[in-house]
């Protein structure tokens, strides 16, 4: 099962109904940022351009993440200190 939610001002919240299952869960943290390049816009009129974006968080926190947390019944609080 995949669960997630947006991070705003360093905070996130995932409801129990949409959240991770009880037990051990692997964590991925993603963020997009503009690269400063313009690229052709997908699914748009020919010649239409858009800002290119790329992953802003190091792989070790997402595609190569080893972060895990044990979710228990009830309220859980998990803080993640990332070093970029």
Image (spheres, rainbow, N blue to C red):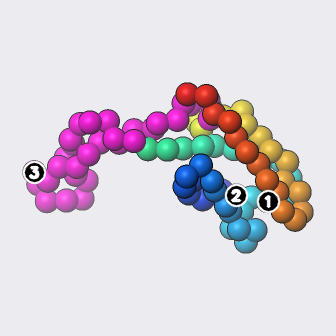
Q: Residue at x 87, y 65 (%)?
A: 74
Residue 63 vertical position relative to residue 8 in the rendered view, above or below: above
Q: Nearer the viewer, mark 2 or mark 1?
A: 1
Q: Are the residues at dot 3 and dot 1 in contact (C-beta closer than 8 Å)? A: no
Q: Position of residue 61 (x, y in %)?
A: 62, 35
**Residue neighbourhood size for the residue with mark 3, other residues' Cα within 10 Å, grouped as few (<14), some (14–19), many (≥20):** few
Question: Which residues are drawn in magenta?
Answer: 33-61
Q: Where residue 5 is drawn, which disc sits there? A: none
Residue furthest toward the right? 73
Picture disc at residue 1? 2
- Give whichever of 9, 18 is nearer the camera: 9
x and y percentages locating residue 26 in the rendered image: 73, 44
Q: Which residue is mark 3?
A: 47
Disc 1: which residue: 21
Decide if residue 3 is on the left or right side of residue 46: right
Horizontally, is 18 left or right of 22 in the view?
left
Q: Residue furthest left?
A: 47
Sequence-first tag of 2 and 1 = 2
**Does residue 15 show up magenta in the picture?**
no
Distance CA(mark 2)–CA(mark 3)? 39 Å
């Amino acid at each position: 099962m995949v669960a997630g939610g947006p991070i705003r001002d360093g905070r996130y919240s995932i409801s129990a109904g949409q959240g991770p299952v009880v037990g051990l869960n692997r964590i991925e943290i993603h963020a997009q940022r503009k690269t400063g390049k313009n690229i052709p816009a997908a699914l748009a009129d020919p010649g239409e351009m858009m800002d290119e974006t790329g992953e802003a968080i190091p792989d070790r926190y997402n595609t190569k993440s080893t972060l895990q947390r044990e979710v228990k019944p009830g309220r859980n609080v998990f803080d993640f200190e990332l070093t970029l």
